[in-house]
Image: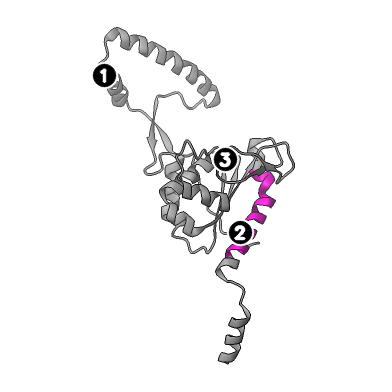
Amino acid sequence: QEGYGVIVLNPNENYIEVEKTKAQIQLSSDISDEPAEKRERKDKIQKETKKRRDFYEKYRNPQKEKETMQIYIRDNGSPEEHAIYVWDHFISQSAAENVFFVAHSYGGLAFVELMIQREAEVKNRVTAVALTDSVHNVWHQEVGKTIREWMRENCCNWVSSSEPLDTSVESMLPDCPRVSAGTERHELTSWKSFPSIFKFFSEAVKAKNSLVKPTPTRRSNRIKYEEF
């Protein structure tokens, strides 16, 4: 209705599980150089842990009874890698005039990592960023001053809070403003704040256009008429 094109990232799908072959199971048990006694004790602990996990998995997923291994997806082995991959291959290549991000929870951390790795590109293409209950931390992620300043101007984090929607929430971090999502439930913060998020995006576009297209002065109007 409002002309948005949407790309949905899937940062939690980083690997597939496949069943181990007998050769792989045998190889994994043969490669250890630890003393036999230490290895036996370690194996016993691992087996007990696996037994408890498998007991749960058996009832949650009766089909999964065999030993498996994880194969990570190339260039997408973590949420951070996935965000960068999608940016490089899809978002940055798009024809969109305005690019917006909505990043929930760990997605906020992945977006900040994207900014660290692709700062100039993100600043050039992204108009505004809406975070919802983001778990990013500009200190732990060692975010530079220029990125923190950009986030203060172009980001907003709707956080879980008992306060009414859009009420300002105090933050100890020097990055984007924090406001209430109008709910204390983490998983509902995006849904509850959608009306405010799209208003935020609309205002960001207006602000951007006002900078790109300054209001004509009397002198410029006079020149325009004189040219005719």
In the image, taking residue 140 as reference, residue 28 lies left or right, namely left
* Residue 134: numbered disc: 3
Front position in the image: 124 or 77: 124
Front position in the image: 88 or 228: 228
Region rendered in magenta: 190-208
Q: Does residue 130 show up magenta in the picture?
A: no
Relative to 134, residue 222 above or below? below
- Residue placed under numbered mark 2 in the picture: 204
Secondary structure at numbered mark 1: helix
Q: Which residue is drawn at 42% across and 37% down?
A: 15
Quadrant containing the N terminus in the rendered view: bottom right
* Residue 30: numbered disc: 1
Amino acid identity at mark 3: Ser
Q: Where is residue 167 in the image (x, y as percent from the top left)?
A: 71, 44
Q: Is the magenta stretch mostly helix, strand or loop?
A: helix
In the image, taking residue 195 as reference, residue 157 lies left or right, namely left
Q: Where is residue 31 in the image (x, y as percent from the top left)?
A: 26, 21
Q: Does residue 197 show up magenta in the picture?
A: yes
**Residue found farthest to the top:** 37
Amino acid identity at mark 2: Ala
Whether residues under marks 1 and 2 lie with C-beta atoms below 8 angstroms apart, the answer is no
Quadrant containing the C terminus in the rendered view: bottom right
Chain-order first, disc 2 or disc 3: 3
Secondary structure at numbered mark 3: loop
Q: Quadrant of residue 172?
A: top right
In the image, taking residue 211 as reference, residue 118 lies left or right, namely left
